[in-house]
Image: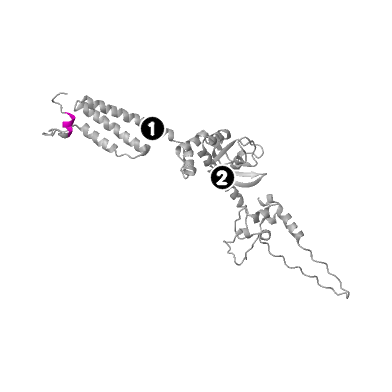
Amino acid sequence: MSTSSPSWDQAVLQPPACYAWKEYMEGAAYHLASCIVLLGYMGGSGIFGSIYIFGLLAPGYFCYALWGWLSTCGLDILVWNVLLVLTCVLQLAHLAYRLRRDTVPEEFELLYKAMYLPLQVPLEVYREIVKCCEEQVQSLVRDQNYAVEGKTPIDRLSLLLSGRVRVSQDGQFLHYIFPYQFLDSPEWESLRPSEEGTFQVTLTAETDCSYITWPRRRLYLLLRKDRYIARLFSSHLGYDISEKLYSLNEKLFAKFGLRFDIRLPSLYHVLGPASSEGELEEAEELPRSPQPEHGLDGALEPPPQPPPPPPPASRPRSSRAESDLLGEDSTSLVLEDFAELPGSFMDYVSEGEYMK
């Protein structure tokens, strides 16, 4: 080491003092570079924040390179700043590639915001789901059938994006399918992966519709590979099927304007075929009243009256006066309640006529 150059210990313990400042300032390129670099370090996080940072650092280091070349004539300043400019440009190219890869069509972006973003599904998982359907949006024109009863095989799972689809069976309307509902969720859940079947209903587009579809085999492979996606589809399908069941329940009504759950036991006995048989069996089990007998004097003796049967414990009923109109418990309804309602199931010949 030469005696003119100070050692590291001397530089740390006895730093050199500036005895005289330069009389002239650096060129405009140096000050412009400092301002641009200062603005560049004010960027935020995320992919767009990184694009902002490196987008400003690249021209800032380029101005430093011009200053080292034109003003100070320093080769080291020029080389280092050129390397920093190239690094920033490469990082910008990588960020642009990531941004383009993460971009999805508008229909899939709206689908993500409607169904998957509320569940906080990561974008990486959502891209796997979209990749399974090949990012293709299918279309249905008005009055075009998506599936025909007894003919169309169950080989896919589809989700409606726009429009409205009518579901019918034997020419009888059942319910509608609206955007962001599955077209064939009951059929999908009714079959195992190794089974095959056909649609039991007809699905017809009432307006121009668009939908996405997953091939059955590819979707089963994806669900088998990723358990998180499998649970996600299971929750969506379960919710969708329950919505379809409750849309069918909208046709069951009473004179008080109450809507009943089709799972209630009292309503099941009304709609089920075993209700009439149960009433007949109860009638047969009741004791018969004895025939009147003639006494010796020819007078008619009144027959003994049987004691009234105790009320059944399985069906406790509350008084109509005590129950509120909107707060009445629908589980207390029995067959007689529906028989006296106008427009109820008892006024129709068959269940198919009632569901019209």
Q: Is residue 276 placed above or below 201 in the rendered structure? A: below
187 is within the stretch colored magenta: no
Quarter occupied by the N terminus:
top left
282 vs 156, left or right, is: right
Kindly identify which numbered label has been placed on residue 64. none
The residue lying toward the viewer, choosing from 31 and 275, is: 275
User: Which residue shows up at 34% across the image and 29% down it?
Assistant: 90
What's under tag 1, amino acid-wise? Ala
Residue 192 percent across, percent down from the top left: 61, 38
As drawn, the residue found furthest toward the bottom would be: 297
Say what secondary structure mark 2 lies in: helix
User: Which residue shows up at 42% across the image and 33% down it?
Assistant: 100
Residue, disc 2: 238
Q: Nearer the viewer, mark 1 or mark 2?
A: 2
Q: State which tag comes first along the sequence, 1 or 2.
A: 1
Residue 181 percent across, percent down from the top left: 55, 43
Residue 248 percent across, percent down from the top left: 61, 49
What's under tag 2, amino acid-wise? Gly
Residue 338 percent across, percent down from the top left: 66, 58
Residue, disc 1: 96
Q: Is residue 124 placed above or below 6 in the rendered structure? A: below
| Mark 1 Cα-neighbour bin, 10 Å: few <14, some 14–19, many ≥20 | some
The residue lying toward the viewer, choosing from 329 and 294, is: 294
10 is within the stretch colored magenta: yes
Q: What range is drawn magenta here?
A: 7-12
